[in-house]
Image (cartoon, rainbow, N blue to C red):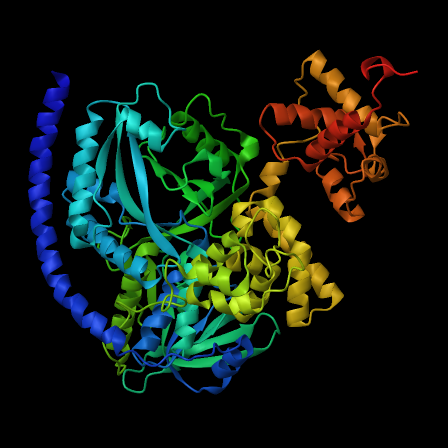
């Protein structure tokens, strides 16, 4: 009876909501259908792209010698690069400066979703908020564009919403159907309801008890850092002078002869890599610096109030076996009211995000509290037979979401979920807020405002329908040609095709011969990931200038597995050193900086903190005796500790060779008091932490267990067990 009432009530409310949304959606579709045709034609009329990508040195020279630019963008995130691409394709003389690397901030630390925002639609309907509705509608339109403009970097992803109470089924069904309806003709695929048995068939890790069924809807997913880079590279090919590691020191101003007012006319810039400073003049300067919005606004006017309210979002990465290959999960109401996504990504599983106030910093650090919160929420949705272990967190990061208050609004305290374009008295244009999915629309609105404010002569927006770097000749079967033409492993070929699109052939051409029967070319950086050495060489052509650029944004190793990234670092630094003519001291500095980045910003510290010299040993007497016996196999001299020499001796006896520096690193993970040796107590703490699930994948534990098993197999068989003898 209660269920019937719930269905009837939801149907009445949902029916009214659907009718309202349908009317708005039809009107919006009618208006946008004609606009889209015009914009696609405009994209076809965009300036001719350069065949060859300018080098960074050529871009820096262009910034110094090209005279006055029409538009100068500060910030190389998704929005900043989007502004540069929009301006360049309209025929405006464009420059872009980024003080770090492209996508080094928030744009590489997202949930990797291209979405309209299911929860925002819910709020729009419940509160009859037309602005929220418009934001969702725009985001869904931009979602379709982003999937089409870079199909190699993005794809639709089904996301499951598990239902554990009967009344929630019609409630959520209406909400998800409204989401489809608002998308209109740009709906990726229609949502559908699953029975309990079918839901468990598609997502076998799901908690079974009290499960009623599930609803599946579709959003997009992408490789965020590579998408950001594709936008930057496309802007460069259309003539924009784009430079990473180019820091804005201060704004340049001139007095307007007509009004007598001070007007922004450019910036003082410093090449971070060489230390050289120079001026870049421009008719219009755009501030697209995300969380650092207020710092640039204060360069213009020290008295201006802050509009950015930064919020930290932490994500964690776990092994791929925690989720199906092609099905995500949405927890719509966590224990504290937040939303958690649990998604397959790059053959791993990503979970997040949290949402908590934070200070603005270039180096946000994930906290143990946030990691444990995410793990706790994941446990609520996975079956009892799936042990969610802290030690299975392979990487963790924090991204700062730049929420803003609208300075143009009367209510300056209310946070705007949409983007805000603000023009200061001196003509500085600030674009802030918004979301990754709507970067193109944000850029369009910003350049429209720039043209109007500064009387620039330019065409209308041309980015709708414009394909990004690598998309033009990409096809879903491109990886087959890479295998057939170059002799790459299938997994490596698929990775190259989905990362570089039609530029994958350029990477394959410079791939080194392996010396094996198969694969013919393509030496991997680490065995368990499809990244190859040729990508490091190609990454330098894509403006990578540090080892951190390579492990985090050209490849995504740091975001997938911090230990694998650390393992690949020496080879990456060697290759980059050859390409960029680094001396030995520079290579050493790059290695240390990258290790520091992994340790603090990518969760290595919170991972290693799981094993400390205060860790409790909670092992049974039988386990303690078993591990002591294993330890003594290495500690032949009964010293009470083992060193690299002890481990090397045992490995040599079973014909296994490991480089000495690698052994030092393996022992250093467990050497809590850092005295160059692993004591029995430290080893027992390690084994206890592994049993409790706080630590996983310990190289020393795996090595010692493997050696013990090998030694046992090599023991001589006693005569009485060998079938006789003299």
Q: Nearer the viewer, residue 139 or 222?
A: 222
**Left-right relation of 154 to 120:** right
Q: Residue at x 29, y 71 (%)?
A: 447
Quadrant location of the C terminus in the rendered image: top right
**Left-right relation of 632 to 359:** right
Above-or-below relation of 358 to 39: above
Which quadrant holds residue 570?
A: bottom right
Q: Nearer the viewer, residue 124 or 296?
A: 124
Above-or-below relation of 49 to 398: below
Quadrant location of the N terminus in the rendered image: top left
Above-or-below relation of 518 to 245: above
Residue 198 in the image, given as x and y percentages of width and height? 29, 29
Residue 679 in the image, given as x and y percentages of width and height? 80, 29
Q: How many marks?
A: 0
Residue 531 in the image, given as x and y percentages of width and height? 56, 55
Q: Residue furthest right?
A: 726
Q: Residue at x 9, y 34 (%)?
A: 13
Which quadrant holds residue 688?
A: top right
Report whether residue 542 is seen.
no
**Left-right relation of 341 to 175:** right
Q: Nearer the viewer, residue 16 or 255?
A: 16
**Left-right relation of 63 to 433:** right
Above-or-below relation of 658 to 8: below
Residue 409 in the image, given as x and y percentages of width and height? 23, 56
């Amino acid at each position: 009876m209660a269920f019937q009432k719930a269905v009837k009530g939801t149907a009445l409310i949902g029916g009214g909501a659907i009718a309202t949304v349908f009317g708005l959606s039809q009107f919006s579709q009618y208006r946008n259908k004609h606009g889209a045709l015009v914009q696609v034609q405009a994209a076809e009329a965009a300036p001719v792209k350069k065949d060859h990508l300018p080098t960074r040195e050529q871009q820096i020279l262009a910034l110094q010698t090209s005279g006055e630019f029409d538009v100068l963008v500060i910030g190389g995130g998704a929005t900043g690069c989007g502004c540069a691409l929009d301006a360049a394709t309209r025929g405006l003389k464009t420059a872009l400066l980024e003080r770090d690397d492209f996508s080094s901030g928030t744009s590489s630390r997202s949930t990797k979703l291209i979405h309209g925002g299911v929860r925002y639609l819910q709020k729009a309907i419940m509160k009859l908020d037309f602005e929220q509705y418009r934001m969702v509608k725009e985001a869904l339109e931009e979602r379709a564009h982003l999937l089409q403009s870079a199909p190699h970097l993005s794809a639709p992803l089904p996301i499951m919403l598990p239902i554990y109470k009967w009344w929630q089924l019609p409630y959520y069904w209406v909400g998800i159907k409204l989401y489809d309806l608002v998308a209109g003709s740009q709906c990726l695929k229609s949502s559908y309801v699953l029975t309990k048995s079918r839901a468990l068939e598609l997502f076998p890790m799901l908690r079974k008890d009290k499960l009623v069924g599930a609803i599946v809807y579709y959003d997009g997913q992408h490789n965020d850092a590579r998408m950001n880079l594709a936008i930057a590279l496309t802007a460069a090919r259309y003539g924009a002078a784009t430079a990473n590691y180019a820091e804005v020191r201060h704004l340049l101003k001139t007095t307007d002869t007509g009004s007598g007012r001070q007007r922004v006319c450019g910036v003082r810039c410093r090449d971070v890599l060489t230390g050289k400073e120079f001026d870049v003049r421009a008719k219009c300067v755009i501030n697209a610096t995300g969380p650092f919005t207020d710092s640039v606004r204060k360069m213009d006017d020290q008295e201006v109030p802050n509009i950015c309210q930064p919020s930290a979002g932490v994500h964690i990465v776990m092994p791929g076996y925690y989720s199906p290959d092609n099905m995500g999960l949405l927890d719509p109401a966590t224990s504290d009211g937040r939303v958690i996504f649990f998604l397959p990504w790059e053959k791993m599983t990503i979970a997040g995000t949290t949402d908590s106030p934070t200070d603005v910093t270039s180096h946000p650090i994930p906290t143990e509290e946030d990691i444990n919160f995410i793990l706790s929420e994941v446990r609520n949705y996975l079956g009892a037979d799936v042990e969610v272990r802290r030690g299975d967190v392979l990487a963790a990061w924090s991204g700062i979401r730049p929420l803003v208050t609208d300075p143009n609004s009367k209510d300056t305290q209310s946070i705007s979920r949409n983007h805000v374009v603000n023009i200061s008295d001196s003509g500085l244009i600030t674009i802030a807020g918004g979301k990754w999915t709507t970067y193109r629309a944000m850029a369009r609105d910003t350049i429209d405002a720039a043209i109007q404010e500064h009387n620039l002569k330019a065409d209308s927006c041309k980015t709708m329908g414009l394909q990004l770097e690598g998309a033009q000749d990409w096809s879903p079967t491109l990886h087959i040609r890479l295998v057939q033409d170059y002799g790459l492993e299938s997994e490596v070929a698929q990775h190259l095709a989905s990362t570089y699109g039609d530029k994958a052939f350029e990477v394959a051409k410079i791939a080194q011969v392996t010396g094996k029967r198969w694969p013919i070319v393509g030496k991997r950086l680490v065995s368990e990931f499809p990244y190859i050495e040729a990508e490091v060489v190609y990454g330098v052509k894509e403006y990578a200038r540090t080892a951190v650029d390579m492990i985090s944004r050209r490849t995504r190793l740091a975001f997938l597995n911090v230990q694998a990234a650390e393992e690949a670092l020496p080879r990456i630094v060697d290759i980059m050193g050859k390409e960029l003519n680094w001396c030995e001291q520079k290579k050493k500095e790059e290695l240390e900086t990258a290790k520091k980045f992994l340790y603090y910003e990518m969760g290595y510290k919170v991972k290693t903190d799981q094993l400390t010299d205060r860790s409790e040993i909670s092992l049974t007497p039988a386990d303690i005796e078993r591990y002591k016996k294993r330890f003594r196999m290495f500690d032949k001299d009964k010293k009470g500790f083992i060193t690299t020499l002890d481990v090397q001796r045992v490995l040599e006896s079973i014909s296994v060779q490991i480089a000495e520096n690698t052994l030092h690193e393996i022992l250093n993970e467990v050497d809590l008091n850092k005295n160059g040796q692993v004591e029995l107590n430290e080893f027992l703490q390690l084994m206890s932490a592994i049993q409790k699930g706080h630590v996983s994948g310990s190289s020393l534990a795996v090595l010692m267990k493997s050696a013990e098993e090998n030694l046992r197999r090599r023991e001589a068989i006693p005569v009485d067990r060998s079938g006789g003898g003299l």
